[in-house]
Image: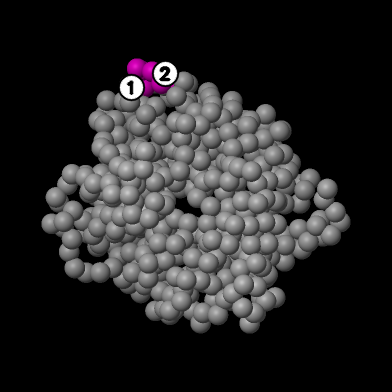
Amino acid sequence: MTNLFEVQETNKMIEESNLDVRTITMGISLLDCCGTDVDDVCERIYRKITTKAEHLVEVGRQIELEYGIPIVNKRISVTPISLVGASCCHEPADFVKIAHTLNDAALKVGVNFLGGYSALVSKGMTPADRMLIESIPQALSQTQLVCSSVNVGSTKTGIDMDAVRLLGEKICETAELTRDQDAIGCAKLVVFCNAPDDNPFMAGAFHGVTEGDAVINVGVSGPGVVKRAIEEVRGKDFGVLCETIKKTAFKVTRVGQLVAQEASRRLNVPFGIIDLSLAPTPAIGDSIAEILEEMGLERVGAPGTTAALAMLNDQVKKGGIMASSYVGGLSGAFIPVSEDHGMIDAVLNDALSLEKLEAMTCVCSVGLDMIAVPGDTKPSTVSGIIADEMAIGMINQKTTAVRLIPVPGKSVGDSAEFGGLLGYAPIMKVNPFSCEAFIARGGRIPAPVHSFKN
């Protein structure tokens, strides 16, 4: 039973601490849209998405109005397109045609983004996988709502360094094709290790092949709520601090569970998972960096930052898993630079470097996220940064990702403007020494010894 106190407490979290449901994401399988004619496949894709997700945005708005809970985004994820287009796509341009169809379908149903322009290549690339990766710059520069991801590594299989090398080139190409928008195309592309099948967050969401025909996944977010709770135990020991975060995460997750169940019932689509991730926004008071600083750090990036983030991540998960039977996705604390004003301030004050961010990704939810670097950064350097992050995920048996944005014409001291939830980012310094000969080796980095657990 929900009592009056709980209702009042939830209202207070929404009004004063920026509590929201960050996204309702409908996952849709496109495996039954496969065929040998690309135009026919595009027609089937458009028809299925616009039928399945016809009422997604409308239902999200109804729930917002009835319960007073802000739902920031309504999104769609689909089966990795390299699989869907394998039989009908004979050149990268065929995949771009599918990207336009996805964008048209997303515009038709009114969602914010559609994810799944993806390939899963942790052990090697099929011809279709390679063509999709080759097509990414054109697809992301020519569409508005399509998001792309490529899984290039896993704990079980190692890291496909041929794909890593190719993606370094394609990220730089995507940046150049969207240079008039500060390389925003790169903000819609994520490179993964150990990518989950049920992630509701963009740009990395896709509908895994192990999923059903359609599913509702919900991502909740409440950095402001957690910060407000921590303020009330300022100066207390770590035991009290951890218990406070854990209890707060439980309350936030219960709000997401309510929204997920309602959306599932009204859309007649099975409920999949709740993603417990704390996802910041550029809004004041909605920052992961501010949470860490409230714990006692002068600036995020100071000594102790990695320990504070590890503790936050763990307590959020401990509290959240008690509030929902189905927890999945990424589930932890996101540390994007452009989407968190506290992270931006730390970079501008020289408290936070790319190397420190990499260290923090060993314990956070995802990885190097929404980081702008100089436009003259070499493709091999981009690939090297990706390889480092993939290695962290592979060895630590966790999901890691890279969303790196080389901004043409800009260097350290400048900033890139993306707008909306993507915010803006200062250009961060990149290590100037070359890794070109390392990346040029190609092949596959083998899986670590602890991967053999069958």
| Image mark for residue 88 | 1
Q: Is residue 449 visible?
A: yes
Rendered image: mark on residue 220 = none
Residue at 23%, 55% in the rendered image: 379
Q: What range is drawn magenta here? A: 33-38
Q: Position of residue 199 (x, y in %)?
A: 50, 44
The x, y position of residue 311, in whole percent, is: 53, 67
Does residue 153 appear to the left or right of 323 in the view shown? left
Measuring 63% from the left and 32% from the top, which residue is drawn there?
270
The Cα–Cα distance between marks 1 and 2, rounded to whole angstroms, is 9 Å
User: Residue at the location (67% across, 35% down)?
Assistant: 264
Label 1: state its secondary structure: loop
Contact between labelled residues 2 and 1, with CB atoms less than 8 Å apart: yes
Would you say residue 140 is visible in this rendering? no
Q: Which badge, 1 or 2, is on the more N-terminal residue?
A: 2
> Which of the image's four quarters has the C terminus?
top left
Q: Residues within 10 Å of mark 2 (few under 14, many from 20)?
A: few
Magenta residue check for 423? no
Q: Residue at x 30, y 34 (%)?
A: 129
Amino acid type, mark 1: Cys
**Labelled disc at residue 40:** 2
Q: Nearer the viewer, mark 1 or mark 2?
A: 1
Residue 303, picture quadrant: bottom left
Q: Main secondary structure of the magenta part?
A: loop
Q: In this view of the protein, which residue sits in the foreground, 74 or 100?
A: 74
Q: How many marks?
A: 2
Residue 88 drawn above or below residue 101:
above
The three-letter amino acid code for the residue at tag 2 is: Asp
